[in-house]
Amino acid sequence: MSLETLKPAAKADAIVYAPYFQGTKRNLLPLAIGLYQQGSLEGERHIEGSESIPFVATWYISKLPAELTRCRLQFDGNAELSYEVNMQNSEFVDYLIDVLMNFKRTRIVDFSRSFYRKLLRIDE
């Protein structure tokens, strides 16, 4: 599924997350929830000075912002290059908003640097 054809979530689904976001992020919330409700995302991790690496991200879906979700990324179709991270749904939706913002700027589907830092547990 392409981000260009992504449908926004129903207002009732997005409104539950509204207290967690302000400004531009709140404006993108219906689209981000629509993406979240898909349960997966295909993209590519940009590597400076090298070829991008394709990935597939999958996650558990819940309607509650405070519940935990487990996100799994598999790079290059290789099971040995799989990583998982648990986080609160509202935090994950925030990362999905970043994906949408990055896509609007660059036309590349990729998570933010801060998401990868969390995924790889760099700041722990």
Image (cartoon, helix red, strand yellow):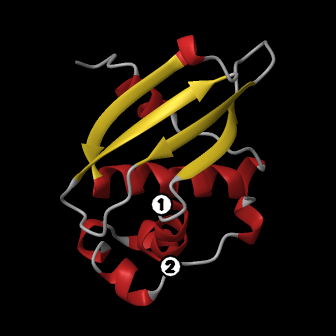
Q: How many numbered marks appear? A: 2
Choose between 29 and 76: the one closer to the eye: 76
Q: Amino acid at mark 1?
A: Tyr
Quadrant in the rendering for residue 84:
top left
Residue contact between numbered discs 2 and 1, judged by CB atoms under 8 Å: yes
The residue under label 1 is 36
Residue 7 screen position, x and y as percent: 63, 76
The residue under label 2 is 9
50, above or below 22, in the image = above
Residue 107 screen position, x and y as percent: 78, 50
70, above or below 104, in the image = above
Q: Circle 1 — which element? A: helix
Decide which of tag 2 and tag 1 comes sooner along the chain: 2
Side of 68 where 5 appears, left or right: right
Residue at 34% of width from left, 16% of height from top? 122
74, above or below 5, in the image = above
Q: Quadrant of the C terminus?
A: top left
Q: Which mark is residue 79?
A: none
Q: Circle 2 — which element? A: loop
Q: Residue furthest left?
A: 66
Side of 88 where 106 appears, left or right: right
Side of 47 where 85 appears, left or right: left
